[in-house]
Amino acid sequence: MTNKPVLLIHGGAGLSSPKNLPQERQEEAISVLKKIVKDCYEMLRNKSPALDVVEAAVNMLEDCPLFNAGYGSVIASDGKCYADASIMDGKTGLAGALCGSTQIKNPISVARKIMERTPHVMLIGEDVHQFAVSEGFELIQNEELLTEYRISQLQRAQKSNKLLLDHESVEEGKSLQPEEKMGTVGSVALDVFGNLAAATSTGGLVNKRIGRVGDSAIIGSGTFVNNQTCAVSSTGHGEVFMRHCVAVRISHLMEFGGLSLQTAAQQVLEELPEKSGGLIAVDREGNFCLPFTSGGMFRGFCNGGEPVGLIWK
């Protein structure tokens, strides 16, 4: 039996309203989201495994300076980019993750190698770089991940002594509530063979402590897949999503509570503090949802028709 494939991607949540994001940045982001969805959905249509497709989609998001992952990641308090990422395969149940990498162009691809080539789930810090080299990846200078937009953003954050949103131009001194600080990229997919996969990648928070790890690297919080239930990639206030184990809770509500994907996802988000973020998810039957409680969430999807790119509700 051949399944109808489904692809979803996200580029982060946490925006408050359209007035906080320049119109040209909105239009560019939507165009990029639709192109990534179109290209990667074609892979699914041509019978590529879901795992290959979510990796490819996140690679493209990591390569785009508009989003907070890979090139164009936000900058930590010491002036460097630090990456967290995770990937999970519904077919095998295996997962891979990394934290704190500073010299890897596409962290999600290294996370996949950790899953496939080691007995571990997660590697951190300098060992990530050593492992990446052993697997044939070329290390880059951290400066190659920086953009002028992010450098200016960090300068404003440090001047006001604040953690800032990744997508918005926040005026100096603006005080943001903790639940407003979020930004990640991710993808989930159902392939023609009925297998699910999910991948999530991030640069974290502007002006964050260099040792901070968010939910994007945590299996069960930022990323989770069970071929019998669903695939989930989260984006939002990482500390909240970790405390509530958001991604795996959706799967558990489906598996043990008999809830539909949409009901389970909505219930989990409603139990979080206001404006905590959002997620993308698809189940084994091809049902999908992209719920969020923040003002906006960069997202795109395709289930056979034209690719869709959205930001606001």
Image (cartoon, rainbow, N blue to C red):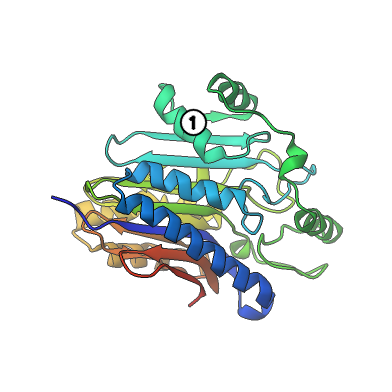
**Residue 68 placement (x, y as % from top left):** 62, 53
Q: Residue at x 55, y 62 (%)?
A: 32
Horizontally, residue 164 falls left or right of residue 49, namely right
Of 83 and 157, the residue lying toward us:
83
> Quick one: SS at disc 1?
strand
Vertically, is 135 above or below 178? above
Q: Residue at x 71, y 48 (%)?
A: 208
Residue at far left of view: 1
Query: How many neighbours does mark 1 have within 10 angstroms: few (below 14), some (14-19), or many (20 or more)?
Result: many
Horizontally, residue 259 falls left or right of residue 134, namely left
Vertically, is 86 above or below 281? above
**Residue 174 placement (x, y as % from top left):** 77, 70
**Residue 78 placement (x, y as % from top left):** 79, 42
Q: Which residue is mark 1?
A: 122
Total labels: the figure holds 1
Of 186 and 35, the residue lying toward us:
35
Q: Is residue 21 visible?
A: no
**Residue 98 placement (x, y as % from top left):** 54, 34
Horizontally, residue 94 falls left or right of residue 294, namely left
Q: Amino acid at mark 1?
A: Met
Residue at far top of view: 134
Residue at far right of view: 159
Q: Is residue 268 visible?
A: yes
Give the quarter of the image for residue 265: bottom left
